[in-house]
Amino acid sequence: MATYVAFLRAINLGPHRKFPKDAIAEATRAAGFDGVATHINTGNVRLETRMRSRARIEAALEEAYLADRGFAVPTIVLTPAELRAVVDDAAGLAPDHTGRHYVSLLKDEPTAAAATAIEARSEPGVLVVVRGRAVHLVVDTDYRGAAVDNTVVEKVLGVSTNRNVTVLRALVSKWCS
């Protein structure tokens, strides 16, 4: 069986999109996945499956989560190697940066033109770098006040979910050894 890490988008926001990590784990197991584990309550799930198609895994999870919660839960799946590469890229992008580093994980790899367009939004205090299905946002200011955030990333590149690089490092340490 292969191991994957799934990232759920837009859960536990406001009173109507609640999906606690224990319920996520239960719904994931009910959908036929094994080796299920969650990390904090932001929609990070480790799972094992015989499926090899990322698109099939995402579709199966999204179907299960919709059935369980009654609302759509876009899900982005990475292999442990892909997640490790994202974290490795993060370490090399701005090693001396003292601000905050976020990563928007994309459902689909962007075209070269779209990647260039979002990177062009970099400005003093905001570095935007695309590496495969990951958009690194390195900001000196509060993330919510930055010129580029996950909302902008989604408008330009499509479905994504955002995590602080500290969380991604923890997942690599916990699930990708």
Image (cartoon, grey):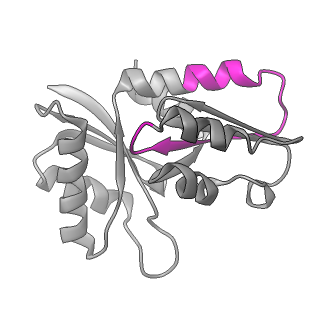
**Front position in the image: 133 or 139:** 133
Q: How many marks can you see? A: 0
Is 64 placed above or below 75 here?
A: below
**Front position in the image: 92 or 32:** 92
Examine the image and state in which quarter residue 30 appears: bottom left
Is 70 placed above or below 10 here?
A: below
Q: Is residue 103 left or right of residue 124?
A: left
Q: Residue furthest bottom?
A: 15
Query: Which residue is at 13% across, 53% downward?
Result: 31
Examine the image and state in which quarter residue 9 appears: bottom left
Magenta stretch in the rendered image: 87-109
Query: Which residue is at 48% across, 55% downward?
Result: 42
Q: Residue furthest right?
A: 124
Q: Is residue 80 left or right of residue 59?
A: right
Visible residue check, residue 110: yes
Query: Which residue is at 40% across, 18% downward?
Result: 177
Q: Where in the figure is residue 84, as x and y percent of width and height?
A: 47, 22
Visible residue check, residue 102: no
Q: Where in the figure is residue 71, as x and y percent of width and height?
A: 31, 74
**Front position in the image: 22 or 130:** 130
Query: Which residue is at 53% across, 27% downward?
Result: 86
Q: Where in the figure is residue 52, as x and y percent of width and height?
A: 16, 30
Magenta-span inclusion, residue 100: yes
